[in-house]
Image (tube, rainbow, N blue to C red):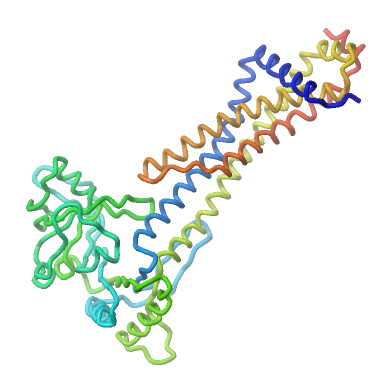
Amino acid sequence: MARLSTPVLREAVRIAFQSLRSQMLRAVLTALIIAIGITALVGMLTATSVMEGSITQQFSSMGATTFTIQQGGMEIQIGRRGIKEKPQPSIPLLQALQLRDRMTKMGYVASIGDNVAGAMEVQYEGLKTNPNVNVTASDANYPVTQGLTIAEGRFFSAADQNEARSVAVLGSDVAGKLFPEGGALGRIIRVGSKPYTVVGVTEPKGSSSFMSSDQVVYLPLRTAHLEFADPSSSYVISVMAPSPQELEASIASATSVMRSVRRLKPGAEDNFNIRRSDSISALLLESLSSVNAGAALIALITLLGASIALMNIMLVSVTERTREIGTRKALGASSQVIVVQFLAEAIVVSVMGGIAGIILGLAVGNGLAYALDAQAVFPLKWMLLALVVSIVVGVVSGWYPAKKAAALDPIEALRYE
């Protein structure tokens, strides 16, 4: 049996490239089939990595020490995964104010906010937004707890809040749509049919599939309550702990205060929820694992079809090159060398398709990053996995044709027409 030295392997690869050049169209089509499977694998896994990064960025913008007290009954579910919670009574504005004021007296930074209206259309003269703008009630500390930065103008003053003035702060997307040349401050916009004077514009925060921080119009808390709230409205109180180390103690304090505000008896179950931004983020990221599994399944099915196509092409190649195989064996080539030659050809085609698939997959996945205005992702582990999968596909698909070629009788092969 011939020893598989470096020259033997180098010669096998050289002959593989020669054979592929002689059948260029066939090689390209075969590599394209494999590239489609690898594109599905890398593209979907890159896209989920982009979504994970976007989710993490969105929730971390609230700060690692921020938590919220809100009505329960929320459901986050992708597929069969997720969490369902028992419905809880709403938190009316009076209770929210009591909790905020008591937490403030204890030295915490606390704010009240809520999405009081959604799918609203905002207008300025002849320009208007799509009907997908959220109206958010917000108090003085809302920018602090939510990580908002004012790009132009100001946030709401104490007089704006106390007198329920008709003023508004625009998210960057809304301002860009209505005032593409700038100059939003002092202009009067309409949210639905109600007029508001613009006093500020926020810096862009970006958006994801799960939330948007720029398609928003912020109104003073009492203004939004009077004009958009209804008896079922439930407000959200955000609290910032002094430090990450004091987060658990701060949550315990807020829980105690909220139980007092709600007048819950000792031993009674909490009828409100406390949510940490990192826990919601972790739940969403865990739910995305089902997307990863689906992506892998689709890619494997595609690669199975590519493997069958590659094996069929290699079998045809063995038949077409029967005389060549007989000549090589008559000149002293061992069965092992013949096997290596055909395996090298299958692996080269597969790796070429894998590299093309990796490039296309990264383009597809990062196309989502561009759409979400998120950071591009180049997942090295998925790229290496795709390359390994390509080599495995080449070995599996080429092994049987290679063994069949090696088993040919040289005399019979030389007679083959």
The quarter of the displayed image where residue 280 is located: bottom left
Comparing 144 with 23, the one in front is 144
In the rendered image, the quadrant that contains the N terminus is top right
What residue sits 55% from the left and 38% below the top?
Answer: 40
Left or right: 75 in relation to 104: right
Residue 172 percent location from the top left of the image: 22, 49
Left or right: 379 in relation to 240: right
Residue 39 percent location from the top left of the image: 54, 35
Left or right: 336 in relation to 182: right
Residue 21 percent location from the top left of the image: 65, 14
* Above/below status of 40 relative to 292: above
What residue sits 43% from the left and 76% below the top?
Answer: 248
Q: So how many labels did they put on this image?
A: 0
Is residue 192 visible to the viewer in this orientation of the structure?
no
Comparing 392 with 72, the one in front is 392
* Above/below status of 320 relative to 166: above
The quarter of the displayed image where residue 335 is located: top right
Is residue 124 visible to the viewer in this orientation of the structure?
yes
The quarter of the displayed image where residue 196 is located: bottom left
Residue 287 percent location from the top left of the image: 50, 58
In the rendered image, the quadrant that contains the C terminus is top right
* Above/below status of 414 relative to 314: above
Comparing 116 with 285, the one in front is 285
What residue sits 35% from the left and 68% below the top?
Answer: 66
